[in-house]
Amino acid sequence: MSTSFESLLEKANRCQLLEPCDLKRICIKATEIFMNENNIVQVQSPVSIVGDIHGQFHDLQELFVKSSYPNKQNKFIFLGDIVDRGYNSVECISQLFLLKILNPNEVTILRGNHETRITRDYGFYRESIEKFGTSDIYNMFQQVYE
């Protein structure tokens, strides 16, 4: 039996590393949602605009403590640069993709330069290998943006 996206978000909110099979499901579903969105997305205000998380999971959580998680009245635009530099890039991108899956109209996620393969030396690639013993997770997340 597969774990629901809601249950996975509960784990992600606690900075728990998700299983590779769950990360694959998240990437597949996120890709499906992104592929069905327009290239230009109109977002009605009010909206919180967030940039340059760079794998700083606890800073991201503090943002949600101050403003609450995305919902019908609390929309977010994430400007990219979610990964690299910090040690919790996998956890940050997993959480944001889950929030997008569960709140597709309240969460907009853009691709920053750190969500490209050219930044392979800034941490996300190495973190994926350290946490999972393979670059498969890194490649799955890259494919979502590609």
Image (cartoon, rainbow, N blue to C red):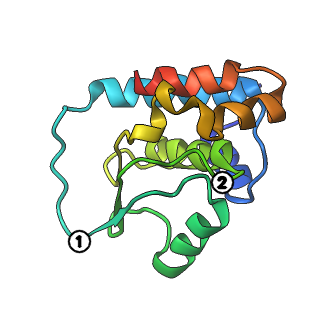
Observer-nearest of 63 and 82: 82
Placement of the N terminus among the 4 image quadrants = top right
Placement of the C terminus among the 4 image quadrants = top left
Circle 2 packing at 10 Å, graded few (<14), some (14-19), many (20+), is some
Residue, disc 1: 46
Question: In the figure, is residue 131 to the left or right of 36?
Answer: right
Mark 1: amino acid: Pro
- Kindly identify which numbered label has been placed on residue 66: none
Position in image of residue 130 (x %, y %): 82, 34
Question: In the figure, is residue 19 to the left or right of 41?
Answer: right
Mark 2: amino acid: Gly
Q: Nearer the viewer, mark 1 or mark 2?
A: 2
**For the image shown, how many numbered marks are present on the structure?**
2
Position in image of residue 132 (x %, y %): 81, 28
Observer-nearest of 8 and 78: 78
Position in image of residue 62 (x %, y %): 59, 74
Secondary element under disc 2, as helix, strand or loop, is loop
Secondary element under disc 1, as helix, strand or loop, is loop
Residue, disc 2: 86
Question: In the figure, is residue 140 to the left or right of 109?
Answer: right
103 relative to 111, above or below? below
Of the image marks 1 and 2, the number of the one nearer the N terminus: 1
